[in-house]
Image: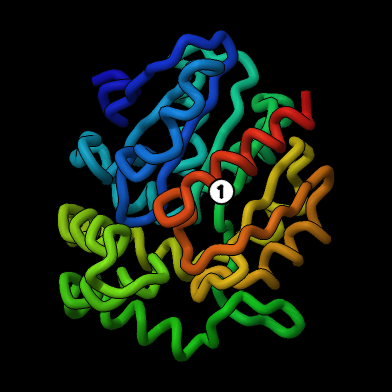
């Protein structure tokens, strides 16, 4: 099976320059449906499902290999290579923002820009670093996910979306979480929430936009501040939005900030 089949890669748009969208934990490429079409007139838009998510080849999810986020970073590079994309722009949400950063750090010059939507290289509080969670609290969240994944999905989706359970984004997230293979979700969730990739962020030299919400229970503004102060060539934009998924709950603001950054970078 080819890389493009493995990750259910979809390409649209009429532009020559490529922009690649990578989704977060428990989701798939459809989570970009409110944002990605806005770039089709100017870019070659690439969407894909992380290995183990959506319509990707689930049999390709090797639990040992994907116990490290670097495997997803390698997948991203493989997709870009298979499509022969020359210095694409990569937009990643949440954990995929971090894997895009890892890919950029490991492959200097491979990407023109990296855009990180609601990134968090480490969810744990550590000294002066405020990741948003004390270790015991985070372990409780992970234990709940391990014991009752569907219950976890229904309870946590509104918190992640930043809106009531009956909200559109909450329902979308809940449905997406519940569509995900539970064994893979439990494994990838643990890897996502317990990873500490702060050292990788220090290695990034690719120009990067950090896009944070001003009220995010998962990735507080303090994380964006830390990344901005740590990374070389980073730009920080904080939007007025509640939750961890501005591409779903505030898509127009997300589109505007991405386009503004790209226009300023040209």
Residue indicated by mark 1: 253
- Given the current orientation, which residue lies at the most extreme bottom position? 136
Name the image colouring: rainbow
User: For mark 1, does the 10 Å Cα neighbourhood hold few (<14), some (14 to 19), or many (20 or more) residues?
Assistant: some
- At 45% from the left and 38% from the top, the residue drawn is 35
Q: At which x and y percent is residue 84?
A: 51, 11
Q: Is residue 95 visible?
A: no
Q: Nearer the viewer, residue 29 or 4?
A: 29
Q: At which x and y percent is residue 219?
A: 56, 68
Above or below for 254 versus 164: above
* Quarter holding residue 222: bottom right
- At 77% from the left and 53% from the top, the residue drawn is 202
* Quarter holding residue 102: top right
Q: Nearer the viewer, residue 236 or 179?
A: 236
* Quarter holding residue 204: top right
Q: At which x and y percent is residue 26?
A: 31, 56
Q: At which x and y percent is residue 189?
A: 35, 64
Quarter of the image with the N terminus is top left
Lateral position of residue 165 relative to residue 204, left or right = left
Lateral position of residue 2 relative to residue 139, left or right = left
Q: Nearer the viewer, residue 6 or 21?
A: 21
Above or below for 147 versus 199: below
Above or below for 11 versus 163: above
* Disc 1 element: helix
- At 49% from the left and 35% from the top, the residue drawn is 74
Count all numbered tags in the image, as a single digit: 1
- Given the current orientation, which residue lies at the most extreme front position? 252
Lateral position of residue 230 relative to residue 124, left or right = right
Q: Is residue 222 visible?
A: yes
- At 31% from the left and 51% from the top, the residue drawn is 27
Above or below for 249 versus 1: below
Quarter of the image with the C terminus is top right
């Amino acid at each position: 099976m080819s890389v493009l089949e493995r990750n259910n890669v979809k390409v649209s748009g009429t532009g020559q320059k490529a922009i690649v969208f990578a989704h977060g934990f428990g989701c798939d490429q459809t989570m970009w449906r409110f944002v990605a079409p806005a770039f089709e007139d100017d870019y070659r838009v690439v969407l894909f499902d992380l290995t183990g998510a959506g319509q990707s080849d689930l049999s390709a999810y090797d639990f040992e290999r994907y116990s490290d986020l670097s495997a997803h970073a390698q997948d991203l590079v493989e997709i870009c290579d298979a499509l022969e994309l020359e210095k694409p722009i990569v937009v990643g949400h949440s954990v995929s923002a971090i894997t895009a950063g890892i890919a950029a750090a490991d492959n200097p010059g491979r990407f023109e820009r990296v855009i990180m939507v609601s990134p968090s290289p480490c969810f744990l509080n550590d000294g002066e670093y405020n990741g948003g969670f004390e270790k015991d609290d985070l372990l409780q969240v992970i234990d709940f996910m391990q014991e009752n994944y569907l219950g976890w999905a229904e309870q946590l989706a509104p918190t992640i979306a930043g809106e009531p359970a009956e909200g559109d984004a909450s329902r979308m997230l809940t449905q997406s979480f519940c569509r995900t293979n539970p064994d893979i979700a439990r494994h990838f969730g643990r890897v996502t929430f317990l990873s500490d990739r702060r050292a990788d962020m220090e290695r990034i030299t690719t120009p990067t936009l950090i896009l944070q919400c001003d009220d995010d229970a998962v990735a507080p503004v303090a994380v964006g501040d830390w990344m901005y102060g740590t990374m070389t060539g980073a730009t920080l934009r904080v939007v007025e939005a509640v939750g961890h998924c501005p591409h779903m709950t505030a898509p127009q603001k997300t589109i505007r900030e991405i386009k503004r950054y790209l226009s300023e970078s040209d």
